[in-house]
Amino acid sequence: MENTRIVALESENIKRLKAVRITPEGNMVVLTGNNGAGKSSVLDSIEYVLGGAKALPSEPLRHGADKGHVVLETESLVVKRTFTKSGGGELIVRDRKNGLEKRSPQSILSALISDLSFDPLEFTRMDSKQQRETIAKIAGVDLMAIDVERRELYDNRTSVGRTVKLLEGKLNGLEYNEQYADVEEVDTVKLMEEMNELNRKKNSKQSVNGELSMISDQITSLIREKKLLEERIKEIDGEVKAKEDKGKELMQELQEMETVDTSEIEAKLSSASEINRIVSDNEAYKETEAELYDAKQSYDSFTEQIETLDSNTKELIENANMPISGLQMSDNGVMYNGIPFEQCSQAEQIKISVAMGCALGNELRIMLIRDGSLLDNTSMAVLSAMAEEYNMQVWLERVGVGDSGIIIEDGEVKNG
């Protein structure tokens, strides 16, 4: 298979490196040496040449150097990235067999490897949520979309919940009078119109009485004048008769008028305000009660949707294709054989993390491990066995100089 591993690496003036050329053998490429010797710079060189602009630091060159380069060879490609002190440089990817330059070089490299493969032990340094999301991605479960949907449902339910509390508070502040449940609101305007009409009639009767009284006085005055003015008797008699006739007419009118009683309407008007207040309170109570019922129904609906989504997500996670047997996604993180990931042994954590990188299915099957000094002999054995099992090429740095491995000293390869 093409591009499965690095067959040669050359790095010059990168970070602490002066000039190194490494031709790796086997699945484990162990870089040893003292602190500051340049071991990390070898791994950095691989990441710089493959990872693109996002992997590059502001100053990749060794202090005092004006230019530098990294050449990485796979079974079928030769990749070269150059660097200048001013920040320039270029990336060239060639066919290893015919030397022809490839188009879109970074796209070719991005298709070979993913971020997690640069350092699979990065998985052990993630928080539980990130670990869960990483495993879900590998297993083909889009937890991000599920989380977005769940957050939207949760926010909607929270909003409705606030409405429920407001309506409950409003309902508690209202009073419902069962005695007035079927009473309609009193039309005070109509009652006032009726009252005005009765008052008009009452005033009319008073006016007739006043007019009648005035005529009586006039008759008395005329009679007096009659006695005083005999010569005007005939004239006055006529006037008296006319007034008397008018008086009879008015008396008849007065007798025909009905007696006006406003006490009933006055009583209704007196009680109308209280009745209307109670009726209005009853209507407000029933409206609020209906709104509260609808809000609670909506809240329960969102709760049911969230529970359904959680249940479906749990089933999706349980049926997901895990990269290693015994690995499970919990609600809050990752479990291995029923134990939280952070409580697993170092060897188990390494086994899981390496499985993560292997499960990505990258064409260039390499791993860069920077914390090799933290691995004990058991963990190293586990790592070596997994590298063999998954056909992975592991580049690992360890502090100290032993009998095995590639020794880096003062920016150069000390042994062959």
Image (cartoon, helix red, strand yellow):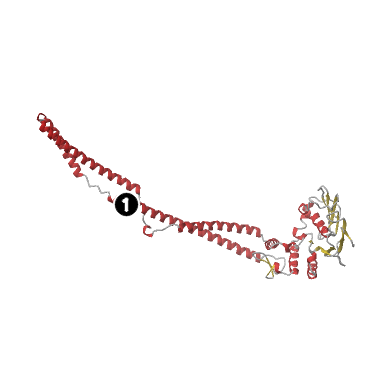
Res 47 seen here: yes
On the image, which quarter does residue 119 sit in? bottom right
Q: Quadrant of residue 130?
A: bottom right
Residue 105 vs residue 90, the one in the foreground: 90
Identify residue for label 1: 268
Q: Nearer the viewer, residue 82 or 371?
A: 371
Q: How many marks?
A: 1
Q: Amino acid at mark 1?
A: Lys
The C terminus lies in quadrant: bottom right
Q: Secondary structure at mark 1?
A: helix
Q: Which percent across, then down, holds residue 278?
A: 39, 55
Q: Is residue 293 above or below residue 86?
A: below
Where is residue 280 drawn, in percent x and y?
40, 53
User: Residue 19 location in percent, x, y?
Assistant: 88, 56
The percent coordinates of residue 369 (x first, y second) are 79, 62
Please rate how many residues cluster around mark 1, counting C-alpha atoms within 10 Å: few if below 14, some from 14 to 19, many from 20. Answer: some
Image vertical order of residue 416 relative to residue 57, above or below: below
The reply to whether residue 289 is in sight is no
Q: Is residue 123 left or right of residue 67?
A: left
Q: Quadrant of the N terminus?
A: bottom right
186 up-or-down from 399: above or below: above
Q: Residue at x 86, y 61 (%)?
A: 408
**Relative horizontal placement of residue 380, taking residue 171 as reference (left or right):** right
